[in-house]
Amino acid sequence: MEIGTPGAVGAQPLFTVPRRPGCGTMGKPIKLLANCFQVDIPKIDVYLYEVDIKPDKCPRRVNREVVDSMVQHFKVQIFGERRPVYDGKRSLYTADPIPVSTTGVDLEVTLPGEGKDRIFRVSIKFVSRVSWHLLHEVLTGRSMPELLPGLDLDKPLSTNPVHAVDVVLRHLPSMKYTPVGRSFFSAPEGYDHPLGGGREVWFGFHQSVRPAMWKMMLNIDVSATAFYKAQPVIQFMCEVLDIHNIDEQPRPLTDSHRVKFTKEIKGLKVEVTHCGPMRRKYRVCNVTRRPASHQTLENRTVATPSHGVWDMRGKQFHTGVEIKMWAIACFAAQRQCREEVLKSFTDQLRKISKDAGMPIQGQPCFCKYAQGADSVEPMFRHLKNTYSGLQLVIVILPGKTPVYAEVKRVGDTLLGMATQCVQVKNVVKTSPQTLSNLCLKINVKLGGINNILVPHQRPSVFQQPVIFLGADVTHPPAGDGKKPSIAAVVGSMDAHPSRYCATVRVQRPRQEIIQDLASMVRELLIQFYKSTRFKPTRIIFYRDGVSEGQFRQVLYCELLAIREACISLEKDYQPGITYIVVQKRHHTRLFCADKNERVGRSGNIPAGTTVDTDITHPYEFDFYLCSHAGIQGTSRPSHYHVLWDDNCFSADELQLLTYQLCHTYVRCTRSVSIPAPAYYAHLVAFRARYHLVDKEHDSAEGSHISGQSNGRDPQALAKAVQIHQDTLRTMYFA
């Protein structure tokens, strides 16, 4: 894959993705099975045609119906025995050329509609031949892509031969089943899995084709997703509002019920049944207080690890913090959490914390009951003004409540106070495990260090100052164009690496490239220097949340931004940059071929299992690593793709480094599924959603995590996620 200047036709590539430096050799080899199957492709050319359908912007489902009808209707004149495959957008492939002129052909297709037929105009124009023969040459190593004109395995265009294979294999299931993303689903037959709230589970399969070593592979995996049940609207409303008997329901709906129902049904399609054969469909845009008889309707488009786990019993934190001044704020009702229960909880917490080397001294300086989100800010201001040197506020929550978002907003952004929330059920019925996990989080929030990598077992990259960066962008829910996307970048602040600093920004909705990355990286480099008195000679950048189709665009913009951050500090400051994309959302699963190699009750592959052959890219530097011990279900390995590497890592070095970073996550005593910096970036972005909650406008119902913006301007949103100066240098997000 080569990255050129955007828009510059024929420009020389600026960035070339590194070749695989060899395969990993460390560790014990074990035999594995994968849910990937070899695909035999005929050594032929296929013919690509561009399809233009008017009216445009129809769903893929409609486009497929149009093309299918076109092939049937014009079988004699044009298509004969040819069976074209179509991607639902603009690309149509055939095994033999279609007899049309070089300027193409215009056809008219009619689909039966609701009330009247729908007429579509379809133009078909030849684009190019796509060579599967050349694809064979590349896959078998007889040629490299750059030597073959027009062949780039990563080109996200229809001329890409891999895309042609994918379209062929997806054509039939796309017509037969319900496609969602890269998966296919069918309505339940013979089973029933209701989820409540008008939803049910549909099962299906994920399918993707990808080049691997010497061959093409088809990745198949089981999928399950939630669908809305096909049912009368009244029945749907009863499920959403938990109404058991509609006849006993007072009319009209209360405002709170109406708001809740609106959230669920808004944007869904309903089919009218009161107009005889005219069963038209409409998309719901709102639910009003007025009855239907008065309503006009309109249709709008709208320790020492063993299998990735270690035991901290009888061991202490690497650096424990002594807590002398602390407070308790209980937002659970007194009848739910009595004073003697609070006393018992604090006594047990103090005992566990002392054993862990993080002594919580004496009794809390403040212990009061409170109610509702509105009392958070006044109480916290009182605490800050009254108790000088207050280190921690433990907040007890009565279940799912808007108090949590307000505690984090006030503590993280407004007053700069360390907070630790605990659910009341864990106070009433506590356990040593729960208390130990609380201590893990409290210690790092106050500047302590829980665990470090054993220095003499670390890779050689640690011999010089190195900073580890993790980056992630979280987007608003699908269909929501108002809430911003949130970009987060974290950076390591010591040599272990254990302590991290965070930067966070809001940006345009659904924008994947981190807009202000240069400024964010610059902040973290400055803070690294203040913390260590060293300038990093290497930057290892783990980037979460990028799909393969976005690799070239994101790499081009973000690699330049990282370089810009370095040069803005010193003209000649050019640390080596390694840019790695971390992918969790894929469908490759790995299984031990030998039953004796399986681990735990779930029979999963061992933590640390690494694959960089057979099912990986033919020549680029990628690998699968299952860094965590699977507790339930089938473990999902993470996929790592190295898009840039100034530091010339060997396969073993980078795989071992990545695995070790999965052991440095502070919230638990087990290795996690992705490296700690990438995980922290996700936590920071997730926390910022809470900071965006505006208690003046946001409803207390439903999920606060959506972080509603309520029309606030970009400056107000940026200010809302800005962390208080006293909190900024701490791991407040732990």
Image (tube, helix red, strand yellow):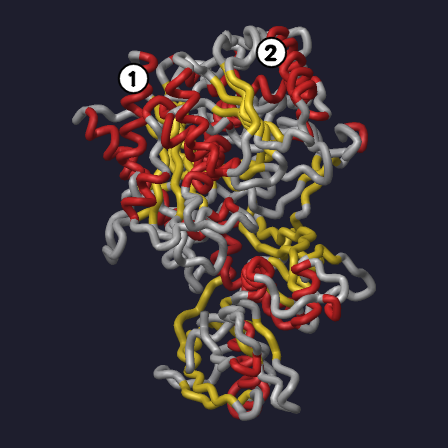
Residue 108 in the image, given as x and y percentages of width and height: 46, 90
Could you tell me which residue is drawn at 65 percent across and 61 percent down? Answer: 227
Could you tell me which residue is drawn at 70 percent across and 25 percent down? Answer: 428
Which amino acid type corresponds to the residue marked 2 in the rendered image? Answer: Ser
* Label 1 CA crowd tier, 10 Å (few <14, some 14–19, many 20+): some
Mark 1 against mark 2, which lies toward the viewer?
2
Above-or-below relation of 243 to 28: below
Which amino acid type corresponds to the residue marked 1 in the rendered image? Answer: Tyr
Q: What residue is pinned by disc 1?
A: 529
Q: In this view of the protein, which residue sits in the foreground, 582 or 689?
A: 689
Above-or-below relation of 431 to 333: above
State the SS at label 2.
Answer: helix
State the SS at label 1.
Answer: helix
Can residue 620 be seen here? no
Q: What residue is pinned by disc 2?
A: 353
Q: In this view of the protein, which residue sits in the foreground, 373 or 502?
A: 373
Using the rendered view, name the quadrant where residue 369 is placed.
top right
Left or right of residue 440: residue 379:
left
Residue 40 in the image, given as x and y percentages of width and height: 63, 57
Using the rendered view, name the quadrant where residue 540 is placed.
top left
